[in-house]
Amino acid sequence: MQDSSVTADYEVEPLGQSNGVCSCCGSETRLVWGFVLSPAGTVASYQVHWTAGAGLGCHPANYDFVIGPWGEGASPADRIAVSLMHFENEDGPGVMVIDAGGRPPAGSGLAASALDRESVIGTELASTAFAIFDTVFLQDTRLYK
């Protein structure tokens, strides 16, 4: 996780949620979404999708972000989609950037582009995405329930 001072200015605004069924195991899946806010305004929207009751080792959770300004005067041309995967392996829990092109925000019309892993890793955008992940993970109390 990021230094807490990085996420101190971010706040989650939870919005909706839905349930479904996992196509591979038949377990219940959950999807929650909302916005991440800073004192200057909305910095991202988010969706988190996971399989309830299944560990992150066999069913990682997907975090999809549309990062950029929202509100009056902002358009999809101002935003990009970035996706992360929250998983667990023999070393413990982890988070990694994945290609956003095949994820739901890519076709939503909410962002101008959906970035692949290589376009994010090692950039300032990666730091922003991980800070947004930390904020959502720590503040959205609906996760993994």
Image: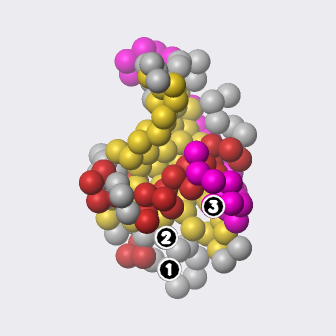
Quadrant in which residue 18 is drawn: top right
The amino acid on which the numbered mark 2 sits, given as a three-letter code, is: Gly
State the residue at coordinates (41%, 42%): 96
Which x, y percent locates residue 83? 41, 49
State the residue at coordinates (43%, 63%): 125
What is the CA distance from the residue labelled 3 to the residue labelled 1?
24 Å
Precedes in sequence: disc 3 or disc 2: 3
* Pointers 1 and 2 in contact (C-beta within 8 Å): yes
* Pointers 3 and 2 in contact (C-beta within 8 Å): no
- Seen in the picture, residue 88 relative to 101 is either above or below; the reply is above
The amino acid on which the numbered mark 3 sits, given as a three-letter code, is: Val
Which residue position is annotated with label 3? 6
Which residue position is annotated with label 2? 68
The answer to if 42 sits in the magenta stretch is no
Q: Secondary structure at mark 2?
A: loop
Rendered image: mark on residue 74:
1
Quadrant in which residue 25 is drawn: top left
The residue lying furthest to the bottom in this view is: 73
For label 3, count other residues whose C-alpha is less than 10 Å away and answer few (under 14), some (14-19) or many (20+): some
Quadrant of the frame with the N terminus: top right
State the residue at coordinates (43%, 65%): 124
Nearer the observer: mark 1 or 2; the answer is 2
Nearest the eye: 13 or 99: 99
Magenta region: 1-28
What is the CA distance from the residue labelled 1 to the residue labelled 2?
9 Å
Residue 28 appears in the rendering = no
Nearest the eye: 120 or 115: 120
